[in-house]
Amino acid sequence: MCCSPSGKPGALNLSVNQCPKDVSGVSDLYCLHRLTPEQERVFEEHYLHCPACTKEVERSQHCIAALKAASSPPEAQ
Ligand SMILES: [Zn+2]
């Protein structure tokens, strides 16, 4: 789901050789830096070799960038 990270990072069981069960949730958490350093490292190692997860990370980054742009007032310069 876009822009709505759910679940607790502590409950995630990430593997370098396997896609996470909730790829979009994990990639959202990853982009929001809500994963533990260990989880971040494992997911990074995985998605660099996984086109599907790379795509999810790109989607999350795009999504979060849009969210940040929307939450900052346009008149603030
Ligand atoms: Zn994957």
Image: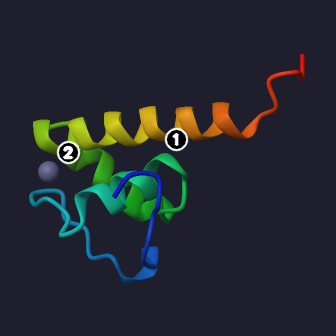
How many neighbours does mark 1 have within 10 angstroms: few (below 14), some (14-19), or many (20 or more)?
some
Taking 30 as reference, is 66 left or right? right
> Residue shown at 77%/34% (left/top)?
72
The residue nearer to you, when weighing 69 against 52, is 69
Which amino acid is tagged 1? Ile
Q: Residue 50, can we see it?
A: no
The residue nearer to you, when weighing 46 against 68, is 68
Q: Quadrant of residue 67?
A: top right
Q: Which secondary structure lies at badge 2? A: helix
Is residue 76 shown above or below 6? above
Applied colour scheme: rainbow
Is residue 67 shown above or below 77? below
Taking 8 as reference, is 22 left or right? left
How many neighbours does mark 2 have within 10 angstroms: few (below 14), some (14-19), or many (20 or more)?
many
Query: What residue did someone put label 2 on?
Result: 53
Is residue 9 shown above or below 11? above
> Residue shown at 26%/76% (left/top)?
13
Which amino acid is tagged 2? Cys
